[in-house]
Amino acid sequence: MTEIEEFYGKLCELVGKENVLRDEKLSAHVTFRIGGPADYFVTPHTCEEVAAVIHTCREAGKDWYILGNGSNLLVSDRGYRGVIIQLFKNFNEITVEDFVVTAQAGAQNAVLARRALEAGLAGYEFAAGIPGTVGGAVVMNAGAYGGEMKDVLTEVTVLDEHQRLRVLRAEELELGYRTSIIAKKGYVVLQARLRLHPGDPAQIRERMNELRDQRVSKQPLEYPSAGSTFKRPEGYFAGKLIMDAGLRGFSVGDAQVSEKHCGFVINRGNATAADVDALMQEVIRRVREQFGVTLEPEVKRLGE
């Protein structure tokens, strides 16, 4: 048996053969709809399986990457030479007890917001339109419309760099603008616990609908994208800088600066990662040249 077949066999033993795919195109698993194949695509069900898969990767010297629903990711056209561990549809349980909501990392923010609404709990409306998972939202302290994860998080269960299960209190997470100690140290989020507060379901629903309408009217949701492409520079708005640089609608191949919201780069159908990268570099160059501000990508990159 070759090393490749032996490694594949170990993954199948850990999570079941039906949960291990080979040469899986990542374009099907990211919201940009861009990206080549991953050598292995694994979908574990439990924290123990996640830890075991990571341990097996490390033993075999294989690179690995944790993926949610891929809402903030640009994958190389050549794909990823390693193991994608997806915490999403097989890892998305949500429980509600009193004012506390406990969610596995793969639970979608929109689903959690709906569950909170059903329980008459307010405080998560801001995240109802954030397309990612709870795990991703924790890592980046996701926020929108005046709310942030740090406002509702109480504790997070992670795998640390030594593959130990740890429970971190919110005050230990160093939550800042699009960052956390989890991102800095490469921890793997497995579960989050949030504390919400009682609210009138009608008012909660009204607020969620209001935020949804704002997103639909202002963001190019009709096209694949990875969300906001650049972080907000201190004292500025990335989208306005890009618009003022005359880049509304600027395109490279099928990658385009959205005409609806210049803070978004969209895939008009057949954009490649190379198209997006070239477009982003030109946007950064022109904004720096005209305004002296260096835009920093918010979108993460993966692959060769």
Image: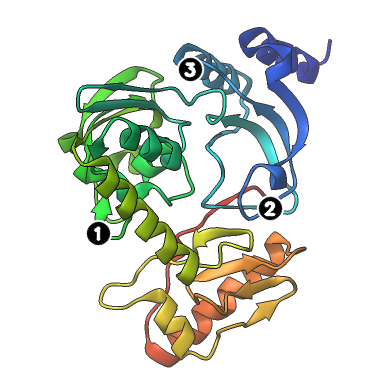
Between the residue at mark 3 and the residue at mark 1, the CA separation in whole angstroms equals 35 Å
Q: Is residue 1 above or below residue 103?
A: above
Question: Are there few (<14), some (14-19), or many (20+) residues within 10 Å of tag 3?
Answer: some
Q: Residue at x 65, y 42 (%)?
A: 29
Q: Earlier in the sequence, mark 3 or mark 1?
A: 3
Residue 234, picture quadrant: bottom left
Q: Which of the labelled discs sits on residue 33, or is there none?
A: 2
Q: Earlier in the sequence, mark 3 or mark 2?
A: 2
Between the residue at mark 3 and the residue at mark 2, the CA separation in whole angstroms equals 28 Å
Asked whether 278 or 270 is in front, the reply is 270
- What secondary structure is found at the residue carrying circle 1? loop
Q: Is residue 108 above or below residue 157?
A: below
Q: Amino acid at mark 2?
A: Arg
The answer to whether residue 145 is seen in the rendering is yes
**As drawn, is 234 to the left or to the right of 274?**
left
**As drawn, is 284 to the left or to the right of 182?**
right
Residue 278 percent across, percent down from the top left: 65, 72
Question: Are there few (<14), some (14-19), or many (20+) residues within 10 Å of tag 1?
Answer: few
Asked whether 20 or 64 is in front, the reply is 20
Residue 41 percent across, percent down from the top left: 68, 29
Residue 273, picture quadrant: bottom right
The answer to whether residue 179 is seen in the rendering is no
Residue 163 percent across, percent down from the top left: 41, 19
Residue carrying label 1? 146
**As drawn, is 200 to the left or to the right of 12?**
left
- What secondary structure is found at the residue carrying circle 3? helix
Q: Amino acid at mark 3?
A: Ala
Residue carrying label 3? 51
